[in-house]
Image: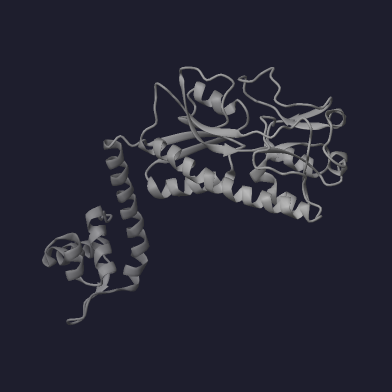
Amino acid sequence: MQANPTLDQLQVFLAVAETGSFSGAARRLSRAQSVISYTIANLEAQLELKLFTREGTREPMLTVEGKAMLADARRMVGVLQDIRARADGLKRGLEAEVTIAVDVTVPSPALVRTLAAFEAEFPSVSLKLNVGALGVIWDQLARRLSDLSFGGPPQQLGDDLVSVRIGEASMVPVAAPNHPLATYKGRVPLAFVREHIQLVVSDVSKVTEGKEFSVFAYRTWRMTDMSTKRDLIVSGLGWGGLPTWMILEDVRAGHLKILDLEPYPERPYPLHAFYRADTPPGPAGAWLIERFSQELPNVCSTLQHMTDEKRRGEDQGRPLSSKPSMMAASTAR
């Protein structure tokens, strides 16, 4: 007959192994020492293995077989603890899973920090993450494919959506250092901007179909993701707006140059959290919104400091970007 150790037996086994004694395990588990000894004896009998040596008055020591079983026992008890935590959370109204949609302009460092803290705070809550541009995050909400969305404000906010301001970010126009817009002396006029290919991210949803956001060039190349757009700009195939957080290292390394374009006004780009009015977030979702609102200012402050350094470098004559600004943003993609 195959051995079928119980979870209780495995918990006792772990307690003895980790405390180093039957008396220590008894204190940890609030049981009589005789119960601990009896449980271990039964477990060894079922497994037909000696898990501990007990010589004279010495404390029990794990045998080679006991050490081999230790990792499996920890894994099984860990699963039990996860089940308990999930059940406790569900009883308190905690979500079993949270699905979020995040706009590509949301600073990635803030997203990573927020999700790392989320995992530590809610280990029993599963998470699904969708990343998109323009109308994707609103479309995800409208189709009930996400519980929360993070990004810029929609063109029209209906009564069915709730918006919470969580911070701000920026988009800046950039080009490769040898691009004509990058080598232009002074602020680039609109007429000159129009003559050069602009790279634009297209909305794969229908939310902004037929709408253009700060598209100035006569010729445009369109793509569906921001990373491809960045690669094409670095290669010199065109110019376009990219999130500030995405391009600072490229600017520092000399792969990109921030442009000073007449048609790109400096203005804030607010970031919001959105959810449906009829399904407000539970504890985990509400925590995500609050945490994002804490992390974004920290990241934006760092980006502003780096941008100011570039501005000072330009004032000293170094070949850096023209008038970079954390808030030199538009809704152009």
Q: Is residue 58 left or right of residue 276?
A: left
Quadrant, the N terminus = bottom left
Q: Is residue 249 visible?
A: yes
Rendering quarter of residue 16? bottom left
From the viewer's side, name the closer residue of 309 and 151.
309
Q: Position of residue 220 (x, y in %)?
A: 80, 28
Residue placed at 77% from the left, 52% from the top? 315
Q: Position of residue 65 (x, y in %)?
A: 33, 69
Rendering quarter of residue 181? top right
Residue placed at 27% from the left, 37% from the top? 92
Q: Is residue 41 visible?
A: no
Query: Eyeballing the image, is 283 above or below 58?
Result: above
Residue placed at 56% from the left, 27% from the top? 153
Q: Position of residue 22 (x, y in %)?
A: 19, 70
Q: Position of residue 212 (x, y in %)?
A: 71, 22
Query: Eyeballing the image, is 162 above or below 125?
Result: above
Query: Eyeballing the image, is 333 above or below 77?
Result: above
Q: Is residue 193 left or right of residue 308?
A: right
Quadrant, the C terminus = top right
Q: Is residue 56 left or right of residue 258?
A: left
How is the structure coloured here? one colour
In the displayed orientation, state which residue is furthest to the bottom: 56
From the viewer's side, name the closer residue of 234 and 90.
234
